[in-house]
Amino acid sequence: SFQNDLVSKSQKGQHWIAENSGHMIPLQEPQIVVKAVKEMVKEIREPNIIE
């Protein structure tokens, strides 16, 4: 799918699926959005450096 192709273009890409939502994910499943943002902030603050 387009989404899988898009996420594969980044080494750190992630594809999140909100199975119980329509187009209003922040309103219908806000916990998924919060979790994704927290993980991104953590990755920015504590990057895993591979040498």
Image (cartoon, rainbow, N blue to C red):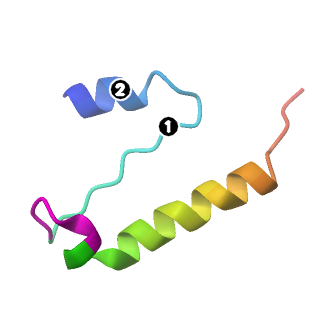
Dominant secondary-structure state across the stretch colored magenta: loop
Q: Position of residue 18 (x, y in %)?
A: 24, 63
Q: Which residue is mark 2?
A: 6
- For residue 13, the mark is 1
Query: Which element is circle 1 on?
Result: loop
In which image quadrant can residue 28 be found?
A: bottom left
Do the CB atoms of the residues marked 1 and 2 lie less than 8 Å apart?
yes
Q: Closer to the camera, 42 or 24? A: 24
Residue at position x 60%, y 55% from top? 40
What range is drawn magenta here? Answer: 21-26
Left or right of 35, for residue 22:
left
Label 2 packing within 10 angstroms: few (<14), some (14-19), many (20+): few
Residue sticking out furthest to the left:
22
Residue at position x 49%, y 70% from top? 35
Q: Closer to the camera, 34 or 5? A: 34
Q: Position of residue 23 (x, y in %)?
A: 12, 59
- At label 1, the amino acid type is Gly
Query: The C terminus lies in which quarter of the figure?
Result: top right
